[in-house]
Image: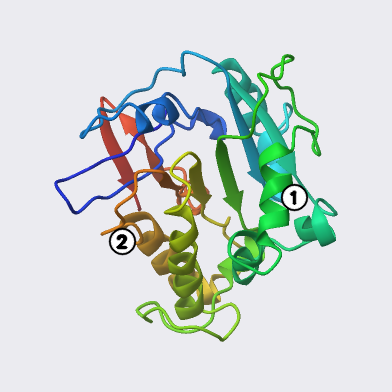
């Protein structure tokens, strides 16, 4: 299930799947993006035709996709998404090894990004054990999901730090990185980019920073973004407690933090 919420000129877009046992269905959001509509209703229906999707991930993403674990691959296949993925060692210069937050500019706006993105959009292979649709619908991947792994929840700095360049894994630098990505996403309205927040860690010492950053990413990052081709799913939140949710219930967004 997915949606894009728009409120006048100032828009907030949030990727909102229902998640029983962490199963995600993208729903009809991709087709809605290109319908020319000015307002989007919450729609849990699968797309009318198969859509190609690529998921950039490492170990947690592999578990999420796996039939015997999270079941994401099966859920997407059931809803007409042909899923491919990247993993360690994938792509030009083994870019698949580098999925930390400070690495995302290399994928999307760096000197080699054109070559990397050409390979990413054309990729149709499986690099993790999961079930998917048997028939490749052809063409390029139209949905790009990208996720950093759990070490990226160890963000230094302070919860309220504003975006600032440099500093590695800090709250401020993480915000600056995601802001930088929007400059590229705005040039590709033909693609849907889904940022998935990094999973949590058990060590609570930097939990406040992780919570603050992921809440910012979900609720503030896209304020003022003029496109309608970017969304966020708060994977971090749903893994931090059984009462924490990011989903659609009765046609409404539910982003619950307890």
Which is more toward the observer, 2 or 19? 2
Q: Going 79% across and 33% down the picture, which residue do you hit?
A: 125
Query: What is the C-alpha distance between the residues marked 1 and 2?
Result: 28 Å
Picture coordinates of residue 146, whole percent (x, y) = 59, 50
Q: Is disc 2 placed on a helix, strand or loop?
A: loop
Whether 93 is drawn above or below 15: the answer is below
Horizontal side, residue 117 vs residue 234: left or right: right
Whether 123 is drawn above or below 116: the answer is above
Which is more toward the observer, 244 or 46? 46
Number of marks in the rendered image: 2
Picture coordinates of residue 159, whole percent (x, y) = 39, 77
Horizontal side, residue 22 vs residue 223: left or right: right
Dot 1 crowding, Cα within 10 Å, few <14, some 14–19, many 20+: some
Q: Do the residues labelled 1 and 2 touch (CB within 8 Å)?
A: no
Give the residue pinned by disc 2.
220
Q: Quadrant of the N terminus?
A: top left
Dot 2 crowding, Cα within 10 Å, few <14, some 14–19, many 20+: some
Q: Going 19% across and 54% down the picture, which residue do you hit?
A: 10
The tag earlier along the polypeptide, 1 or 2, is 1
Q: Is disc 1 placed on a helix, strand or loop?
A: helix
Report the colour scheme: rainbow
Picture coordinates of residue 185, whole percent (x, y) = 47, 53
Which picture quadrant has residue 15? top left
Q: Residue furthest left?
A: 8
Q: Which of marks 1 and 2 is in front?
A: 2
Give the residue pinned by disc 1.
59
Q: Residue 134 carries which label?
A: none
Horizontal side, residue 108 vs residue 251: left or right: right
Picture coordinates of residue 202, whole percent (x, y) = 61, 63
Q: Going 40% across and 32% down the picture, which residue do you hit?
A: 2
């Amino acid at each position: 299930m997915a949606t894009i919420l728009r409120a006048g000129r100032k828009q907030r877009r949030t990727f909102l799947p229902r998640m029983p046992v962490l199963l995600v269905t993208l729903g009809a959001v991709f087709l809605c993006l290109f319908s020319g509509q000015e307002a989007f209703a919450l729609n849990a229906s699968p797309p009318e035709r198969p859509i190609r999707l690529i998921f950039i991930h490492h170990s947690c993403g592999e578990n999420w996709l796996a039939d015997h674990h999270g079941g994401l691959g099966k859920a997407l296949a059931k809803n007409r998404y042909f899923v491919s993925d990247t993993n360690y060692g994938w792509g030009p210069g083994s870019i698949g090894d580098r999925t930390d937050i400070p690495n995302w500019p290399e994928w999307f706006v760096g000197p080699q990004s054109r070559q990397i993105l050409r390979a990413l959009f054309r990729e149709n292979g499986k690099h993790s054990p999961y079930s998917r649709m048997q028939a490749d619908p052809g063409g390029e991947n139209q949905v790009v999901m990208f996720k950093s792994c759990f070490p990226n929840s160890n963000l230094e700095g302070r919860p309220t730090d504003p975006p600032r360049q440099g500093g590695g894994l800090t709250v401020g630098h993480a915000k600056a990185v995601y802001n930088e990505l929007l400059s590229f996403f705005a040039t590709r309205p033909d693609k849907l980019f889904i940022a998935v927040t990094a999973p949590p860690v058990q060590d609570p010492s930097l939990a406040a920073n992780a919570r603050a950053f992921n809440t910012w990413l979900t609720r503030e990052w896209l304020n003022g973004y003029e496109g309608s081709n970017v969304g966020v799913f708060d994977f971090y939140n749903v893994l931090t407690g059984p009462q924490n949710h990011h989903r659609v219930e009765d046609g409404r967004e539910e982003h619950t933090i307890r």
